[in-house]
Structure formats: structure tokens, C-alpha cells
Image (cartoon, rainbow, N blue to C red):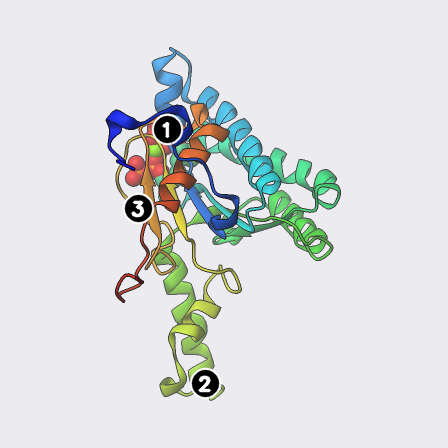
Amino acid sequence: LPSFPFFTSKSQVPKLDPEKLPEHIAIIMDGNGRWATAKGLPRTAGHKVGSETFRKIATYCNNIGIKHLTVYAFSTENWKRPKEEVDTIMGLLKQYLLEACEKMVKDNISLKVLGDTSRLSPEIQEIIQRTDELSLQTTGLKVNVCINYGGRGELVHAMQKLAQKVSSGELDPEDITEKTISDALYTAGVPDPDLIIRPSGEVRISNFLLWQSAYAEFYFTPVLWPDFDENELDQAIISYQTRSRRFGGIKKA
Ligand code: IPE
Ligand code: IPE
Ligand code: MG
């Protein structure tokens, strides 16, 4: 059958294949500020709506059977922003984490914060401890929220951990492998992302999952994060499902 656009009928529009879902989806939640500015609102209004989008997308991922969802919420570079904006974002993250404490066991979702949490408020650090404990009881979707996260910082942290083990005699330099490095990252135990989505029209990685993205499939869309929805996620997954992942090998016949 010709697969040319001329012949595209509704039934030929590709549909999401529930058998070939990515196991791990990662999202750079970008475009909140531009969304707000375009509406004549303060940037903080964009972050509020963006945090609702995050709730919606996490629920959807849980419903369709995604195993791991990692979102970039605040980078190590985002401290450069005005204090009021940083405070708003931290407030929204705290609110989300508190809400997660109430709901995650019922929803069977686990939650992990990835990043250098030592720079977060003592209050947030304490809530993170609680979500860590609650996560031990759940088996469904695993959500990783990257806060004060940077891919280079994560690698520096991992190198320091490994160097300490070497200097204490616990580890031989020859025994450092890709696996020991992966296991020293914040994402230890989490499979590498299959699909990385960046909304907002930017086509860059901005220090996200540098090590883990080695063979990820990328999906970029101009949609701003507050406007991102379930249908947009479907489009990203459908695009992923049309790709031929070769991992350096050759295409299977
Ligand atoms: C993403 O939206 C949220 C964070 C980086 C914390 P932005 O705030 O970066 O939105 P734009 O890119 O300025 O539109
Ligand atoms: C990346 O977005 C970080 C998050 C979405 C949390 P930025 O808006 O900070 O990235 P740049 O500055 O456009 O590269
Ligand atoms: Mg941005």
C-alpha cells in the first residue's frame, strides 16, 4: 500500500502502540516564562501552570504504563534567576512534594529527587526524606524530579565518590567501569532514558542527563510546557515508535 501523504486517511494516522512504550521518558519542562510573558503575566504565573502540567503528565504516564519518568524542574544554573522567581519555583516544588506524601501510596507512585539537595531548604530536605521512605512501599511509576540538578555536577559528584573509594583502598582504578560510574550517579538503578522530550522550541540539552542520554531518542516541539498535554506526549511516543534504534549496530532485517 502506498504510504505517501496523499493516501493518508484517518485510519492511517499512526497510533500509539501500547506494546512498544519507552520504559523511561525524560522531559525538560521548558517554556513557562515565555508562556506567561506572551499572556502579559509575570513569569511566576507560567511556573504555576507548568506545575499543573507536570501533575497531569505524571498521572497520564502512570495510567498508560510508563515505568520511569524523569523531569528537569530546576537546574544548577537556574539559581542565576531573580530571587522572587527562584522562591516561587521552590515553593511550587515543596507544595508538590507535600502533596505527593499524601497521595503517592494510594496512587502507587514512587518519587525521588535527583540533584544536590544540600542546597535546598531544610524543610524541603525533610520532605524528601519522607517521600524516600514512602517510595519503599510502592511498585508503580517511578518519578524522578531533578532539582538543583546538573549533568556535569552529577558527574563531578560521582567522580568524587569513586576517588574516595580508590583512596581508601576499597576500589581498584582498573575496576572502574561504565557500570561503577552509572551506579555512582544520582540515577543509580534507573535505566537510561529511552526518550528525551524538550518543549519550548529550544534544541539543546542544557546540562540534563549528560551520561545517561548516550543512546536516547530526542523529541523537540515548539509547544511551551504549560500548553503541553496528553496528546503532545502521545505524539512524542508515536515519533519514538517510528525510530530505528541501532545502538551502533546495523538495522535488523
Ligand atoms: C522552565 O521554564 C522552568 C525552569 C527552568 C525552572 P523557563 O522558566 O525556563 O521558561 P522560559 O524558557 O524562560 O520560557
Ligand atoms: C533547562 O531550562 C532547565 C529546566 C527546564 C529546569 P533552562 O530554561 O534553564 O535552559 P536554557 O537556559 O534555555 O538553556
Ligand atoms: Mg527556559
Q: Amino acid at mark 2?
A: Leu
Identify the residue position indicated by label 2 in the image. 171
Callout 3 secondary element: loop
Residue 224 percent coordinates (x, y): 37, 26
Q: Amino acid at mark 3?
A: Ile
Q: Earlier in the sequence, mark 3 or mark 2?
A: 2
Residue 28 percent coordinates (x, y): 40, 40
Q: Earlier in the sequence, mark 2 or mark 1?
A: 1
- Residue name at image x 41 percent, y 22 percent: 43
Choose mark 3 or mark 2, whichever is in front: 3
Identify the residue position indicated by label 3 in the image. 205
- The N terminus: image quadrant: top left
Q: Amino acid at mark 1?
A: Gly
- Please report contact status of discs 2 and 1: CB closer than 8 Å, yes or no: no
Q: Nearer the viewer, residue 209 or 10?
A: 10
Q: Residue 6: which numbered mark, if any?
A: none
- The C terminus: image quadrant: bottom left
Identify the residue position indicated by label 1 in the image. 31
> Residue 248 falls in which quadrant of the image?
bottom left
Q: Is residue 253 above or below residue 229?
A: below
Q: Ligand 1 within 8 A of label 1's CB?
A: yes
Question: For mark 2, does the 10 Å Cα neighbourhood hold few (<14), some (14 to 19), or many (20 or more) residues?
Answer: some
Q: Rounded to the nearest whole Å, what is the CA distance between mark 1 and mark 3?
A: 14 Å
Callout 1 secondary element: loop
Question: For mark 1, does the 10 Å Cα neighbourhood hold few (<14), some (14 to 19), or many (20 or more) residues?
Answer: many
